[in-house]
Image (cartoon, grey):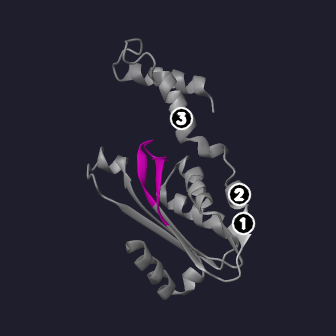
């Protein structure tokens, strides 16, 4: 990431909107935005498979659900935040991963400019590829600031996406069980 380019661009944006980038309240803003970009777009350089590579053997095919994982991401269309919760369910096929690793996987993909639909798919595909479970179901519920504070201006509106892989694609009762568990 090129912080100097980000800082120069922020100065130009401030000038373009009629602000003085050298006034007291704004003079440090380009540096702040540069540091912020390192933090909120840091997932571009992160290898997700590292989070999911440490697994533990399990004798059965248990349903694992980690729900209400908070996330923050940036819409690639407007560079405005969208945020909410991710729910990940999978049926193990002999191995499980530490629970914090699922949350780390969410963060790694969320810290990229992108869309919710792609985020949902990336998480599901990473779990399938790295854990080789019998199936995975990923559900995301999020509010998009590009819809809340601009354009249509409908704050509080939530967008839900979900994707099913493996046995979840074939078994509606299994999906229903996960949906009921999430609502508890």
Q: Is residue 99 above or below residue 89?
A: above
Q: Residues within 10 Å of mark 1 (few under 14, many from 20)?
A: some
Instruction: Name which of mark 1 and mark 3 comes first in the sequence.
Output: 3
Q: Which labelled disc corresponds to residue 55?
A: 1
Q: Which labelled disc corresponds to residue 49?
A: 2
Q: Which residues are magenta?
A: 67-85
Q: Quadrant of the C terminus?
A: bottom left
Q: SS at mark 1? A: strand
Instruction: Name which of mark 2 and mark 3 comes first in the sequence.
Output: 3
Decide whether the magenta segment is chiefly helix, strand or loop: strand
**Mark 2 → mark 3, Cα distance in angstroms:** 23 Å
Q: Is residue 78 above or below residue 171?
A: above
Q: Residues within 10 Å of mark 2 (few under 14, many from 20)?
A: some
Q: Quadrant of the N terminus?
A: top right
Pinpoint residue 157: horizontal percent, then vertical percent. Answer: 30, 58
**Mark 1 → mark 3, Cα distance in angstroms:** 32 Å
Marks 2, 3: nearer the viewer: 2
- The front one of 149 and 138 is 138
Residue located at (48% from left, 81% from top): 175
Circle 3 is placed at which residue position? 37
Q: Is residue 144 left or right of residue 12?
A: left
Residue 181 location, quadrant: bottom left
Residue 176 location, quadrant: bottom left
Q: Is residue 1 above or below residue 128?
A: above
Residue located at (53% from left, 51% from top): 110
Pinpoint residue 77: horizontal percent, then vertical percent. Answer: 45, 46
Q: Is residue 73 left or right of residue 102?
A: left
Q: SS at mark 2? A: helix
Does the magenta segment cover residue 90? no
Marks 1, 3: nearer the viewer: 1
Residue located at (54% from left, 30% from top): 35
Q: Is residue 139 above or below residue 144?
A: below
């Amino acid at each position: 990431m090129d912080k100097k380019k980000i800082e120069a661009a922020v100065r130009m944006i401030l000038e373009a909107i009629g602000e003085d980038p050298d006034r007291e309240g704004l003079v440090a803003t380009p540096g702040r935005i540069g540091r912020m970009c390192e933090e909120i777009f840091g997932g571009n350089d992160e290898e997700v498979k590292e989070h999911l590579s440490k697994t533990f053997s399990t004798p059965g095919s248990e349903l694992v659900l980690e729900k209400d994982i908070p996330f923050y991401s940036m819409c690639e269309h407007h560079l405005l935040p969208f945020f909410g919760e991710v729910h990940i369910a999978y049926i193990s096929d002999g191995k499980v991963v530490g629970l914090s690793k699922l949350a780390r996987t969410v963060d790694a993909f969320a810290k990229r400019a992108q869309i919710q639909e792609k985020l949902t798919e990336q998480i599901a595909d990473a779990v399938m590829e790295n854990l080789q479970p019998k199936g995975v179901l990923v559900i995301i519920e999020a509010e998009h600031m590009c819809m809340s504070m601009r354009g249509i201006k409908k704050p509080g509106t939530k967008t839900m996406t979900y994707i099913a892989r493996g046995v979840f694609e074939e078994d509606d009762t299994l999906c229903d069980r996960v949906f009921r568990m999430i609502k508890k």
